[in-house]
Image (cartoon, rainbow, N blue to C red):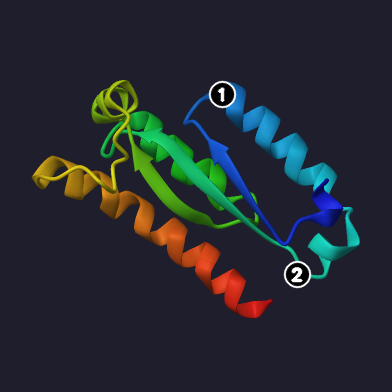
Amino acid sequence: MVKLADLLILPMLPSAFDEGVTRRFLDRIKKVRRIASGRIRVGIVGNRIRGGTHSAGGFERFVAGLGAPIVARVRDSQLYVQSAATGVSIFDARGRRWRALRADWYPLLAFVEQDAARL
């Protein structure tokens, strides 16, 4: 499947479990010619990141050594639970708190759009 992709987005939690799995996965896919040549870009999305915490700092340090950029950091929020329960996306909901969640996604959307422009 990786060989057929145009872009890879890897979600990653700030945890020791995700660190090991992500490192092994990246080591494995770096052998794919289209990834090694840069034709398939790889980006990491930090999932459930709580800014200013030890786990967020550890996540940043770990990813810095992987050779794949962090393209977005999505905060941990109960608003996602509310969104799922009501069937309203964070892009449809209104209010200041929702605006902050949407802002987390803009860098990822830009990463995807930039790649779409390459194709």
The local crowd at label 2, few if under 14, some if 14 to 19, many if 20 or more residues have their Cα within 10 Å, is few
Instruction: Give the residue at x 84% y 64%.
Output: 34
Position of residue 24 measured from the top left corner of the image (x, y, whole percent) = 76, 35
Left/right placement of residue 43 relative to residue 41 reads left
Q: Which mark is residue 38?
A: 2
Position of residue 10 measured from the top left corner of the image (x, y, whole percent) = 61, 44
* Label 1: element kind: helix
The answer to which image quadrant residue 115 occupies is bottom right
Q: Nearer the viewer, mark 2 or mark 1?
A: 2
Compared to residue 112, the image places residue 65 above or below, namely above
Q: Report how many numbered discs are placed on residues in the image.
A: 2
Front residue (pair 103, 56): 103
**Between disc 2 and disc 1, whose residue precedes?**
1
Q: Amino acid at mark 2?
A: Gly
Position of residue 46 measured from the top left corner of the image (x, y, whole percent) = 46, 41
Instruction: Give the residue at x 32% y 50%.
Output: 104
Instruction: Give the residue at x 36% y 59%.
Output: 106
Q: Amino acid at mark 1?
A: Ala
* Label 2: element kind: loop
Instruction: Give the residue at x 32% y 39%.
Output: 89
Front residue (pair 73, 90): 90
Point out the residue furthest to the left here.
Answer: 96
Position of residue 26 measured from the top left corner of the image (x, y, whole percent) = 74, 45
Which residue is the site of mark 1?
Answer: 16
State the separation of the CA atoms marked 2 and 1: 28 Å
